[in-house]
Amino acid sequence: MKEIKVGIIGFGTVGAGVAANLLEHGEMIAVRTGVKPVLAGVADVDITRDRGVNVPKELLTTDSTGLIAKSDIVVELIGGTTIAKTFILEALSQGKSVVTANKALLAKHGVELFAAAEKTGARIGYEASVAGGIPIIKALREGLAANRINKIYGIMNGTCNYILTRMEREGLDFEPILKDAQQLGYAEAEPSLDIDGFDTAHKTAILASLAYGEWFGMDPLYIEGIRDISLTDLRFADELGYRIKLLGIIKQDADGDIGIRVHPTLISKKALLADVSEVFNAVMVNGDYVGNTMFYGRGAGREATASAVVADIIDISRGMADGCRNSIPAFLPGKLFRGILPMAKTENRYYLRIQVKDEPGVIARMSAILGDKGISISSFIQKEGQSGDNVSLMILTHLTREELIKGAIGEIEKMDQVREKVKLFRIEDIS
Amino acid sequence: MKEIKVGIIGFGTVGAGVAANLLEHGEMIAVRTGVKPVLAGVADVDITRDRGVNVPKELLTTDSTGLIAKSDIVVELIGGTTIAKTFILEALSQGKSVVTANKALLAKHGVELFAAAEKTGARIGYEASVAGGIPIIKALREGLAANRINKIYGIMNGTCNYILTRMEREGLDFEPILKDAQQLGYAEAEPSLDIDGFDTAHKTAILASLAYGEWFGMDPLYIEGIRDISLTDLRFADELGYRIKLLGIIKQDADGDIGIRVHPTLISKKALLADVSEVFNAVMVNGDYVGNTMFYGRGAGREATASAVVADIIDISRGMADGCRNSIPAFLPGKLFRGILPMAKTENRYYLRIQVKDEPGVIARMSAILGDKGISISSFIQKEGQSGDNVSLMILTHLTREELIKGAIGEIEKMDQVREKVKLFRIEDIS
């Protein structure tokens, strides 16, 4: 049985999980796959702290470069886009394949990393970079490779989904739930990466790149986070039959143009995706042959992420045992789209919440503004029993272009009776 | 670009879908994977009927043997366990890799087929044999390979799920819905394979084999279909917070013993799996590292099944292009369990519906029978407003052994006041 030496750089939460998995399940993996990944070492600046896993002392080291030299596969779990990149390039330059969960690094520097791998015939595995334990990279690259990808919708940030689930269930607003989530360890002290949508954006960029054959980086993405979602909006959405989720959205239109974006989205409560709650992740992929598929599981955490990292280790190990390092290239460029649709040119349905002073003619004026832009209203609700000074109007629109609705909102906000910025959320009709 | 010649045997629904996919998406697949599968021919006894796909006439043939000889990969889509097997063995003996959707053949004769493939270094792809377009074979064999598999729950027969969904939504009983499903083409004229659970059982046997490293065949399976599910039971289940689904269930206990079975099962309406409706399939896999995952999509049909068949074609083609035919063996034996738990020894929660003549002492007697077996009751319901001559009693039990509940039912059915056979369904607590 061929043994493959695995070196882990970064003894944090996920690093400890990967070490534990290899130590606990090495034999099982050998039985199941015919090749045995063996823990060659774990490198970290701090190798004395207890990580809850019994790694033999002689396998712990502070010498990452030394560990790279003696490993067949290098697992990068430091995070960040500086030292992590240095170590990965060092490993690739020596022809060592790399497995990483580093979505930020991949999204931003993927092209450079893949080129470095290409040069030496090394492989890069990054299953763990998107949606944790869910094998979505494999599904998209291999399992659904026979499909033109029409749409991808992903709930890919556990922190955001946890906050939204609790707001909805407990009837509390964003700020207090965020604070509680921080105390419970479900949100970072500096939560921006998660709640402003950047983490979801990194993952969305990776999925879009795989689906359409160009490594996009972050430039083409439109990104909005969840800070602006209020309990009021969740409740109105609920009454209208919707939930609000932070989605990564990738869509290709009939002309071949694609839009890549991250924003809070109203989806029907009847959609399976709407039932994905708490820290769970799910990615829905619509392919022209397969139709709708959905992949669900834990998007983060020590064990789930380790599951994905070790899956990559196994794939690469199998290839090495068979002498075909490149059986699945990390990324194959080949343009499968026409152009990128700027956000302003995308077509969406919209939910608007407008706070107004209830005076005669307000609704007529608003309708006229929307009508002038050719925006068709599918639902218009003014609740009874609100004080006339600050009344909520909800408008749901039919499909219209983003630039048109933004223009209309600009005019609506100029009205004397409009009390605050208009709330806008997009609606996706997911079956 | 390496071209791989693909020959399809069987020009039925799925065969036409695979031909259409290769003709339509061959170039896209080449861009995406670096290797190009090319349609070498389609063989069938009838090559004149219109199949809704424009296969060039010169590629149609009645000569399967000739097509095998000129193909690199042979796709078997005839179905059945006789001629299909002959053609597969013929292809494998020539070292041609085979892709098939034939679950019955695989479940029953997998060992023989894998041995034949092993002999010549050919590969066998069977992603399409389980849950149609959902890449569940790949997920289980590769994506989740780092996990000890604790549980698998699968809704894997679209006909059954369609019938149950309609019974529930329309409030109609099994027989009229089955008839309507037959007229609409969602159920076969001879529906036994589907509704008596055998099709689900074939798929369950394949997943169990992959999870635990032994090709089980059908012998270890306990199988019950959906004929006995009445509207009454669906309604009572609904009131109690459950739906009834036909599940393939694979579970490993703490001792390493596994149970493999197919039967109608009550699952909480809050479980994501309970929301899988109509003809859709879903497989939930619980692994010790990854936790709960779920894979959802279309389980049958021309396009979805073609998506899975072509995924296998791509995998094998990639391997051939790289010169590593065996990178993922079709099946690797290696026992990852202790023994098979016979159904009588499994522990379950149960739903019992007992039709009784309402006389003093009936409930006392029934409770005594259950109590004597050590069976603990979690819920006991007798509805008001039923006529005293034929009253429904529902009992939900805590976990107990199958042989104990069966013994208790035997005694309950001997009671004078019990009007008909006791209905028994098992409950799974799926979160």
Image (cartoon, coloured by chain):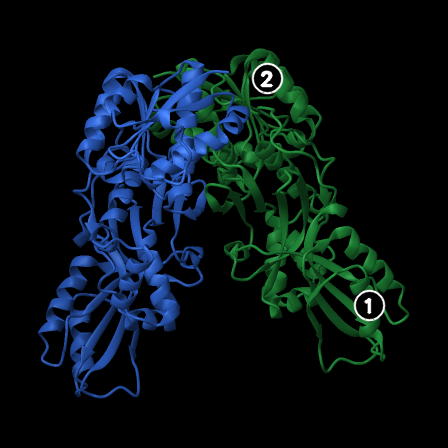
Chain colours: A green, B blue
Q: Residue at x 66, y 32 (%)?
A: A107
How packed is label 2: few (under 14 Cα within 10 Å), some, or many (20 or more)?
many
Residue A148 position within the rendered picture, expressed as x and y whole percent measured from the top left? 53, 37
Q: Earlier in the sequence, mark 1 or mark 2?
A: 2
The residue indicated by pointer 1 is A368
What number is the disc on residue A117?
2
Q: Amino acid at mark 2?
A: Ala
**Horizontal placement of B304 versus A150: left or right?**
left
Residue B195 position by quadrant: bottom left
Q: Provide the chain ID for the residue under circle 2.
A: A
Residue A34 position within the rendered picture, expressed as x and y whole percent measured from the top left? 34, 22
Q: Are marks 1 and 2 in contact (CB under 8 Å)?
A: no
What number is the disc on residue A63?
none
Q: Provide the chain ID for the residue under circle 1.
A: A
Q: A77 or B185, which lies in front? A: B185
Label 1 element class: helix
- In this picture, is A182 found above or below A136? below
- In this picture, is A342 found above or below A329? below
Q: CA distance from mark 1 to mark 2?
A: 58 Å
Q: Residue at x 58, y 46 (%)?
A: A154
Residue B232 position by quadrant: bottom left
Q: Residue at x 36, y 24 (%)?
A: B58
